[in-house]
Image (tube, grey):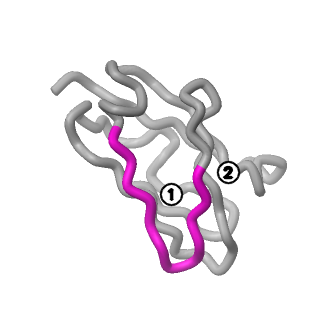
Amino acid sequence: MVTAIDYHFHDAHPSLPIALDRMVEVNNQGSNIHNVTFEGAGYDENVRPGKRLVIDPQELFGEPGRYPFVCRFHADRGMSGVLVVVPT
């Protein structure tokens, strides 16, 4: 799980290794709307305060790797992370 709090992705510098067949949750526990953008994968989704996104790494990436992401609303404040996906 990755948590968006204010202008920071908690547990994403990098994330703990996540198996390719496991879902990834991004929870917004802050007071601002945030966004998760994996530019290389064409993924760009907003997450409102108190809400969550569920991402399927197998469907999105198709293989293990290190996948950088940003909040496009707050990238200028350094809101970024790296999702580490490992084999199943």
Q: Is residue 55 magenta?
A: yes
| Horizontal and vertical percent position of residue 20 | 25, 31
Which sits in the foreground, 69 or 59?
59
18 lies above or below 48: above
Kindly report which numbered mark, 1 or 2, lies closer to the viewer in this rendering.
2
For image coordinates 67% across by 70% down, the residue present is 33
Instruction: Give the crowd class for mark 2: few <14, some 14-19, many >=20 residues within 10 Å.
Output: many
Task: Give the residue at mark 1.
Answer: 10
For image coordinates 28% across by 38% down, the residue present is 18
Q: Earlier in the sequence, mark 1 or mark 2?
A: 1
Q: Secondary structure at mark 2?
A: loop
For image coordinates 44% across by 52% down, the residue present is 11
Picture disc at residue 79: none
Task: Give the residue at mark 2.
Answer: 71
Q: Is residue 59 magenta?
A: no
For image coordinates 39% across by 47% down, the residue present is 55
Given the image, on which type of amino acid does mark 2 rest?
Cys
Mark 1 and mark 2: Cα distance apart in space: 13 Å
* Side of 35 where 13 appears, left or right: left
Which sits in the foreground, 69 or 53?
53
Q: Which residues are magenta?
A: 45-56
Residue at the far right: name it.
Answer: 76
Instruction: Specify the quadrant of the image occupied by residue 73.
Output: bottom right
Instruction: Give the crowd class for mark 1: few <14, some 14-19, many >=20 residues within 10 Å.
Output: some
Q: Where, quadrant-wise, is the C terminus in this rendering? A: top left
27 lies above or below 63: below
Q: Secondary structure at mark 1?
A: strand
Q: Where, quadrant-wise, is the N terminus in this rendering? A: bottom left
Given the image, on which type of amino acid does mark 1 rest?
His
